[in-house]
Image: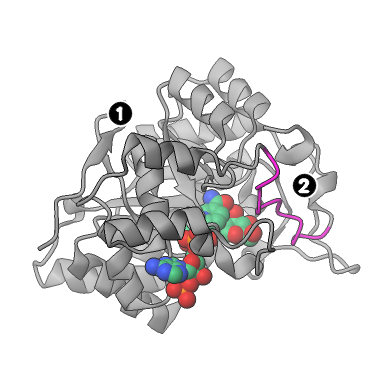
Amino acid sequence: MSVKVPSIPLYTGQEMPVIGIGTWRAKDQEIHDLLNMALESGYRHIDTAFMYQNESAIGDVLEAWFSSGRLKREDLFITTKLPMNAMRASDVERFLQKSLAAMKIDYVDLYLVHNPVGMKNDEKTNSFLIGPDGSVVLDLTTDHVAIWKAMEAQVDAGRTKAIGISNFNSKQIQTIIDNCRIRPANMQIEIHAYHQQKELREIASRHGMTVCAFAPLGAPYKGSGSSEFPQLLEHPVVCDIAKRLGKTPAQVLSRFLIQLGLIVIPKSSKPERVKQNFQVCDFELSAADMSAMEALDRRGKGRIFTFDIFKGINSHPEWPMHIPF
Ligand SMILES: NC(=O)C1=CN([C@@H]2O[C@H](COP(=O)(O)OP(=O)(O)OC[C@H]3O[C@@H](n4cnc5c(N)ncnc54)[C@H](OP(=O)(O)O)[C@@H]3O)[C@@H](O)[C@H]2O)C=CC1
Ligand SMILES: O=C1CO[C@H](CO)[C@@H](O)[C@@H]1O
């Protein structure tokens, strides 16, 4: 029996389910399998991005669910993101229209600026323009205030219900807050037990923004861990709590973040794990377990996503890691 998943209200009035399905690195058949399993298990929140190149496969699955009457559009909370190669005011509507057309829907619930860094667009492929040295070609003219005004226009036009930011640092968040007409309703940042982001969570709370944790399981595919800092899914503290509660380490990692008041979007390529990851609202961590999990924070040293897979990106003035948070 599945338990109803709670939602967190956005100030714009929608309800954002605390657990959503992450979709990065999933395309075509994988999306078909994992999204069907997610919707059958009860997930009603989907996280994607133009950059993930899977919006069209997501659209095919949604169309089948809508046309069979199993779900209505308003039953779902769908987030997508403005890619780094569209970080210009004049590109915002064009790229949101592409996402909507691919997913065969006429609005998203949340449109996020994916990353504060701007890159040049390859007009043939609508992806990052790669220079002769193999690096992405940066667009150094990135103007967050102009982009935000174009984001606000998408709310006015009804193409998205809410707008937000992802991977912005405290200074960049403040620039948006100081210059907005429509406040960001949500921010999506890397958060897991090793990187708990207390400072940015406090900033979000001060400005009435909900927070969605990406890589909530510690993105284990990114590295094998060490004896000092094992993979979170194998950490003895996490495994002991899981064993005692009859849950899996993945469920404990998500549950911890949900009890901190966050929204989580774990991703798995395995339908059985997709189902398992949804079962996080039928148990609770005690105050002692929460303290033990909080003690795993590596105080700024647990960050996994620095985006330097994009060669040269850290020379962009808006690369968010120029400051600690
Ligand atoms: N805004 C942004 O910049 C970013 C947003 N995101 C979003 O966040 C989502 C989640 O982050 P992601 O980077 O995927 O990392 P996660 O922390 O969700 O980890 C995913 C990994 O965990 C494994 N896994 C999942 N469930 C289980 C389980 N129950 N037991 C054991 N292993 C498990 C998966 O392996 P397997 O497939 O083998 O199950 C996969 O390798 C993304 O899919 C994307 O939607 C992510 C990164 C950046
Ligand atoms: O969402 C994302 C998935 O991971 C990518 C590679 O690190 C990120 O750039 C991006 O923000």
Q: Residue furthest right?
A: 133
* Residues shaded magenta: 300-311
Q: Which callout, 1 or 2, points at the residue further toward the start of the chain?
A: 1
- Report the quarter where the N terminus lies: bottom left
Magenta-colored stretch includes residue 4 = no
x, y percentage for residue 24?
50, 65
Residue at label 2?
139
Q: Amino acid at mark 1?
A: Thr
Label 1 beta carbon within 8 A of ligand 1: no
Q: Quadrant of residue 54?
A: bottom left
Q: Quadrant of residue 66?
A: bottom left
Residue at label 1?
12
Question: How far apart are the alpha carbons under marks 1 and 2?
Answer: 32 Å
Q: Which mark, by number, is residue 90? A: none
On screen, residue 274 above or below 159:
below
SS at mark 1 in the image: loop
On screen, residue 79 above or below 130:
above
x, y percentage for residue 171?
67, 25
